[in-house]
Amino acid sequence: MRSIEQGSLPETVETLSANDRFNELLLTGLRTKWGVSKNELHNTLNLDSDWQKRLSHWKSNEYLIETTDAFLLTEKGKLLADAIASDLFVID
């Protein structure tokens, strides 16, 4: 409030870790009709076999599809978007 009263806008800068950037990309990307970019995910982190296994689970149960460029939720997957995203989050 003091900053505004003095004529300046307060600002904060949030620095995200690689894991946080990955999780943000995943969460926001899966909620769009375009899905989450595979390139952006892979450029953020190297994904291990455990992550690939979790991804395969959602794909094999038809909640998620993989295209050349992206991972997208199916209509069925949209009902579980938050659960899928949280399962695929990378945690320190």
Image (cartoon, rainbow, N blue to C red):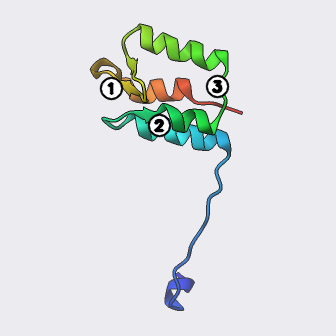
Amino acid at the residue labelled 2: Leu
Residue lying farthest bottom? Answer: 6
Task: Kindly identify which numbered label has been placed on residue 78.
Answer: 1
Q: Which quarter of the picture shows residue 63?
A: top left
Q: Could you tell me which residue is drawn at 30 percent across and 18 percent down?
A: 76
Query: In front here: 37 or 89?
Result: 37
For label 2, the crowd category at 10 Å Cα-Cα, with few meaning under 14, some 14 to 19 and many 20 or more, is many
Residue lying farthest right? Answer: 92
Q: Secondary structure at mark 3?
A: loop
Q: Position of residue 24 (x, y in %)?
A: 52, 42
Amino acid at the residue labelled 3: Leu
Residue on which the image places disc 2: 27
Q: Is 82 displayed left or right of 41 in the figure?
A: left
Amino acid at the residue labelled 1: Lys
Separation of marks 1 and 3 at Cα, in angstroms: 23 Å
Q: Position of residue 17 (x, y in %)?
A: 68, 46
Q: Is residue 20 above or below residue 64?
A: below
Q: Is 92 displayed left or right of 31 in the figure?
A: right
Residue on which the image places disc 3: 47
Question: Which numbered disc, 1 or 2, marks the residue that appears first in the sequence?
Answer: 2
Q: Position of residue 48 (x, y in %)?
A: 67, 21
Q: Position of residue 72 (x, y in %)?
A: 38, 27
Q: Is 34 displayed left or right of 39 in the figure?
A: left
Question: Which numbered disc, 1 or 3, marks the residue that appears first in the sequence?
Answer: 3
Q: Secondary structure at mark 2?
A: helix
